[in-house]
Amino acid sequence: MAKDKLTDYDSTASNNLDVGGISVAEGMLPSGVNNAIREQMSHLADFAAGTSGVDVLKLQDDTDTNSIKLQAPASVTTTTTFTLPDGDGASGQTMITDGAGTLSWAAPYGNRNLIINGAMQVAQRGTSYSSISSDQYTLDRFIAFHTSVTPTITQESLSVGQTDLPSRFRNYLRFTAGTGATLLGFCTRIEDVSKYYGTYKLSFYAKGTNPAGGSFQQRMIQRFGTGGSSQVITNNGTFTVTSSWQRFEIDVIVPSVSGKTIGAGSYLQLQFTQPDSDAGTSAWTLDITGIQLEVGSTATPFEHRSYGDELLACMRYYQQIGGESANVLCTGQCTSSTLATFFIPFIVPVRDDPTCSVSDQTHFRVFNAAVSGIPDTTNMTIAANVAASCNGFRILATVGSGLSAGNATMLYSDDSDNNAGIIKMDAEL
Amino acid sequence: MQISNAQYIVDMDDNNTTIVATIDGDEVFVPLSQGNRHYAEIMRQVESGELTIADAD
């Protein structure tokens, strides 16, 4: 067989009797020499161009003692070209592919998204908000703000089997401004502003209708906490949506925090808003999901986390219990015929001592010794947040009568509507 | 943040431990913690003269 490429060559010199069919055996014609050299040069050119290859690429060490070898699998299904990044990445970065063979440097996968609930799947407080106060939390970790008009926020579901977004997305946030205005939008807050400065990449999926000026504004606000330095606002640019889902990628530069005074409760605020310069009143809608903020200048695919993991992350900032019929919440002790004390531990420790509240106090019950509920429930009240800490808090439940001092007891919510009788613990930023 | 009816709650040693207040229509119990956003806003409004916190009963 003719030796037409490098891999046809034999490591035993005497076995190489031709080059591309041109004889180089003993007694070859002198006129064949130049032809053989030319043939061999074409083989080298094919190798240089990637037309022909080698089985293994061996990179020797300086003393030719050991080597590193790069090798394709024994069987390759599809010929694939990898294009290396242009230069080295930052310390700690890893090489990733775009799925089309182009390699780049990016932060290591796993916990790289600084946004909690970016896929809009957790909604502990509810899924629809129509009378929103400014600075009110809605879907977990997302806050609406406004000054003169009242927007609505809903958690929307993507249809099963949808193909507009990658398959693992199930929800998105819909912000509806019936009337446009400046300083109208929503945001999320990242704990501890002192940790974040430098270059970041923001990415998200969005669709909708634009404000009167034709675009939305994305900005960062560094808030340095109680007693801290004055806030710093950085506008990172605008984006324009259409009626179809698109992925947007925005370069984010967070200014240095050197020299700043950091107080308690500091955070970095990431917000989407009608631009300051756009006072138009046209209605607009923004559907958004897959919000990701990551270190560096490369946008990587959205980092999906399980619902359970995302919920626990959200619970560092907000937890609620109750709201279900005959839902036992905790155990406690009766301290008199009308008073019982309960300690409710948090599911995960919260960020700071939380604000506590109780909705619809008459939807709670306290068991008496007969475990039949307290006869007089209309006088029952719950005083929350006595001795609250990051780990739990105490509840004092007062009833009309029927308890026995010293007895153990249980507190449960009794809500036939499944949306009342809720104890809320708020440690949001 | 609409805040009204702010009043301290004391512990058995008569120390202020909590502020009960109405915030955006809900009665809430706010710890005296600098990192708590409701407490920070209450104190901001107190300093600006917009709000007064009543002593405990």
Image (cartoon, coloured by chain):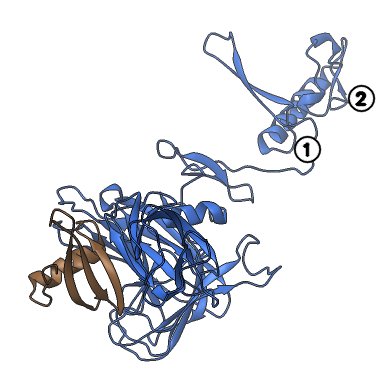
Chain colours: A blue, B brown
Nearest the eye: A249 or A421:
A421
Tell me the SS state at disc 1: loop
Instruction: Give the distance between the C-alpha atoms of the residues marked 1 and 2, in whole angstroms.
Output: 24 Å
Amino acid carrying mark 1 in the image: Val
Residue hosting label 1 = A76
Chain at tag 2? A
Task: Please identify the residue farthest to the right as the structure is shown.
Answer: A1
Residue at image x 53%, y 70%? A172
> In the rendered structure, which disc, 1 or 2, sits on the residue that comes first in sequence?
2
Tell me the SS state at disc 2: loop
Residue at image x 37%, y 87%? A180
Position of residue B28 in the picture relative to residue A65 (left or right): left
Q: Quadrant of the N terminus of chain A?
A: top right
Spot occupied by residue A355 in the image (x, y as percentages of width and height): 30, 63
Q: Residues within 10 Å of mark 2 (few under 14, many from 20)?
A: few
Residue hosting label 2 = A1
